[in-house]
Image: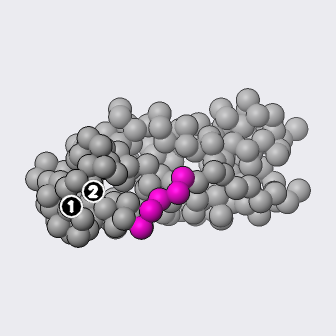
Amino acid sequence: MATKHLSLPVSQVSEIETRVLDATKTALEKWGVARFTVSDVCELANVSRATLYRLFPGGKEVLLEALHVRSLDEFFKTLLSRAENSTSLEDLLVRCVVVATTELRNDEHLAMMLATEPGTTLMQFTIDGLSRIVRVASAYLAPLAAQYIPKREADALVEVLARLVISYFLTPSERFDFTSEVSVKKFLNTHINIHEFSN
């Protein structure tokens, strides 16, 4: 069964907001979370402080939150685009796990943040950010899985896979390579038994 094209509502982001968020990302890379300032972002984005605070009331914390939201949105749009034409539940799950793990491993900004700001970055994958990641993953991917299994099971399955991908990304396994379709199929059939879901 081919999956249907799904489109999720996307918030409209202005050109100035995009410049400010791009500048925030650059500032993070240059100076780190603790050292970058709103003034740095204003200078890099070529906007006034008044404009920045009008767009992102609350300053630095709101900028960081907006950048995290944009990154999650971009990540899951990429994942969704690669998963939309799946032909079975197994195909969908394998694609999602492989693409998600590959995207995380190839993200240069994320690698730099893990190297220079490990505590802050890890918090986004664990204590502070895990529930948000699971919610966003469910919003994007559970409707695709629900074409093969009941929605409640789809939500639970997406949550488990999101947690697994994060865990295996942060602490890679010598037994399973989540960037390999063959390895992911073996893992899913051995440890999750996805064929039970499909029946």
Q: Does 13 appear in magenta?
A: yes
Q: Residue at x 35, y 45 (%)?
A: 65
Q: Is residue 190 above or below residue 115?
A: above
Looking at the picture, tell me which residue is in the foreground, 49 or 3: 49
Task: Count neighbours of disc 1 (C-alpha within 10 A) and say few if under 14, some if 14 to 19, many if 20 or more.
Answer: few
Looking at the picture, tell me which residue is in the foreground, 16 or 181: 16
In contact (CB < 8 Å): disc 2 and disc 1:
yes
Q: Is residue 1 above or below residue 26?
A: above
Instruction: Name the mark on residue 48.
Output: 1
Image coordinates of residue 196 in percent, x first then y, are: 80, 36
Image coordinates of residue 26 in percent, x first then y, are: 25, 66
Looking at the picture, tell me which residue is in the foreground, 178 or 23: 23
Q: Which residue is mark 2?
A: 51
Task: Give the distance between the C-alpha atoms of the residues marked 2 and 1, in whole angstroms.
Answer: 5 Å
Principal secondary structure, stretch drawn in magenta: loop
Query: In which quadrant of the rendered view does residue 125 lie?
Result: top left
Amino acid beneath label 1: Ser
Q: Which residues are magenta?
A: 11-15
